[in-house]
């Protein structure tokens, strides 16, 4: 067990602070011992593979990092005639796995030849490229749960989808599983055609991606119906950076944010992610979701919008909060023409105990939802009937509370001017 290991040296983005504790297990027993060490001390656990898809905070990670690497990277095969079962350690580099099996004349893993990171990380993310993905070849994975029990899970239960798996989904609920080995099934094929396909894919990748500059690959997920890189390019952001930061939208591939010379901090990369995401949202109304895993503390921004349900829930928001259970100032005649920004309404609503309870519940719901979404910018909508009184007050109060907790916020009142003064509610 080591202490104070710098993530910067273990991530392809070349940034990130220190891990409080760090272990590189050589076997499953080591992992079980690590998990016990963390649970006895009440520490969080983060599993790191090749660090090819992680942006780790400059403040590092105040827990235990289990770094899966070459010590758990053995590979064995079982010949089934026209197919071969290949079982490999989760710490094996995906590229080494793909190269090894292709040299054995096995086809199906060619897509993986250019994808950085480990086999475990590739299953967690269901890594894929050029029409292939881990889902096509994985038949099972072995893992250890946080209680230290080892289990095997079959492909049907792995829930492999676009950049997700059961492990990725469970991690959003705060659950830790350590994948220790992965079993794939590959067909026997013609070694020359396999090699030709690999060269073709490698050429494509080298021609289109900035492989000589630190990055985490595609920064954003592909939004439905669009390509993130094209949206970014169409915003005129090719080569864009904030001030003179080394974090830059790659001039070669707009879907990649690169860290020139490894000189940018994680927060500079994060600020650029937020900025690019905002610019795309302003121009196209599409909120980009980060594919890169955000690990540790980042000052995420929360966009809060008050609205009236009678005008419809704002599209694309991550969380909708309902303030309609509060007493409605609409029914107090002299308050009716005012809005939730006016002092008399603030005083009226603040006078009820249930208002404080609702705001506290809203804060909890936001924090809970943020921890389950891998988003740099998170959007919350707070609604009441007409969007003038309760939603405006609650959205403003929610903003105050979230600011106190250290979040960056942005507040808008969408429907505050919509109704005539008479029928505000
Ligand atoms: C230049 C470049 C090109 C890329 N091209 C592609 C591409 O074409 N297609 C693609 O899909 N991706 C691509 N990526 C992203 C990256 O290579 C993949 O997401 C890869 O699968 C990440 O693996 P990793 O081991 O580095 O995971 P890490 O970055 O270390 O971790 C990613 C997540 O997986 C979890 N994890 C890792 N290992 C384990 C384990 N053993 N048990 C449990 N959880 C684990 C981590 O906790 C983390 O949440 C690219 C990245 C770069 C830098």
Image: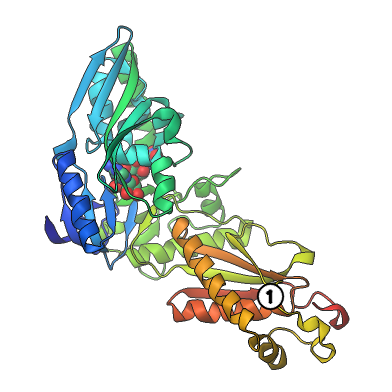
Image spot of residue 28 (x, y percent): 18, 39
Q: Quadrant of ligand 1?
A: top left
Instruction: Say which of 189 and 328 sits in front.
Output: 328
Residue topped by disc 1: 391
Q: What coloring was used for the rendering?
A: rainbow
Kindly state the secondary structure of the residue where label 1 is placed.
helix
282 horizontally vs 7: left or right: right
Q: Residue furthest top?
A: 81
Residue 319 image-quadrant placement? bottom right
Q: Give the quadrant of the N terminus.
A: bottom left
Pinpoint residue 348: horizontal percent, then vertical percent.
70, 89
Q: Is residue 135 left or right of residue 30?
A: right
In the picture, residue 309 is in which quadrant? Answer: bottom right
Position of residue 395 in the picture relative to residue 161 (left or right): right
Question: In this view of the protein, can residue 116 be seen by the observer?
Answer: no
Whether ligand 1 has any atom under 8 Å from the Cβ at mark 1 is answered as no
| Residue 370 in view, yes or no | yes
In this rendering, position of residue 379 left or right of residue 391: left
Q: Nearer the viewer, residue 344 or 409?
A: 344
Quarter of the picture containing the C terminus is bottom right
Residue 300: which quarter of the image?
Answer: bottom left
Residue depicted at 33% across the width and 49% down the height: 176
User: Residue 376: where, in percent of width, then height?
Assistant: 46, 61
């Amino acid at each position: 067990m080591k202490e104070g290991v710098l993530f910067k040296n273990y991530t392809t983005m070349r940034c990130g602070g220190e891990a409080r504790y760090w272990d590189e297990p050589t076997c499953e027993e080591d992992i079980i011992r690590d998990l016990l060490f963390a649970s006895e001390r009440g520490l969080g656990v983060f599993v790191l593979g090749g660090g090819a898809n992680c942006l780790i905070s400059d403040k590092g990670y105040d827990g235990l990092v289990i770094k899966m690497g070459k010590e758990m990277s053995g590979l064995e095969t079982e010949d089934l005639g026209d197919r071969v079962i290949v079982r490999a350690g989760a710490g094996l580099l995906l590229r080494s796995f793909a190269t090894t099996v292709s040299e054995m004349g096995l086809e199906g893993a060619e897509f993986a030849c250019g994808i950085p990171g480990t086999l475990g990380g590739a299953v967690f993310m269901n890594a894929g490229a050029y029409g292939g993905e881990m889902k096509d070849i994985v038949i099972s994975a072995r893992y250890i749960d946080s209680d230290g029990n080892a289990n095997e899970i079959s492909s049907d239960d792995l829930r492999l989808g676009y950049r997700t798996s059961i492990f990725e989904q469970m991690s959003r609920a705060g659950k830790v599983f350590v994948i220790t080995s992965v079993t794939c099934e590959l067909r026997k094929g013609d070694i020359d055609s396999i090699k030709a396909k690999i060269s073709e894919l490698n050429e494509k990748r080298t021609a289109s991606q900035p492989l000589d500059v630190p990055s985490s690959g595609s920064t954003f997920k592909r939004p439905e119906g669009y390509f993130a890189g094209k949206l970014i390019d169409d915003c005129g952001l090719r080569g864009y950076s904030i001030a003179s930061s080394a974090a830059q939208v790659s001039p070669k591939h707009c879907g990649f944010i690169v860290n020139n010379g490894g000189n940018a901090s994680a927060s500079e990369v994060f600020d650029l992610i937020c900025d690019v995401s905002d610019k795309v949202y302003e121009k196209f109304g599409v909120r980009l979701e980060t594919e890169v895993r955000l690990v540790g503390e980042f000052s995420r921004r929360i966009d809060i919008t008050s609205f009236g349900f009678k005008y419809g829930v704002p599209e694309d928001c991550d969380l909708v909060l309902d303030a309609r259970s509060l007493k409605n100032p609409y029914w107090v005649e002299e308050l009716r023409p005012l809005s939730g920004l006016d002092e008399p309404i603030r005083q009226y609503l603040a006078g009820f105990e249930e208002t404080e309870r609702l705001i506290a519940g809203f804060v909890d719901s936001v924090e809970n939802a943020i921890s389950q979404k891998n988003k740099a910018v998170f959007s919350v909508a707070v609604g009441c009937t007409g969007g003038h009184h309760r939603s405006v007050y609650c959205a403003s109060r929610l903003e105050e509370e979230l600011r106190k907790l250290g979040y960056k916020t942005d507040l808008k009142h969408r429907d505050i001017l919509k109704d005539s003064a008479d029928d505000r509610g």
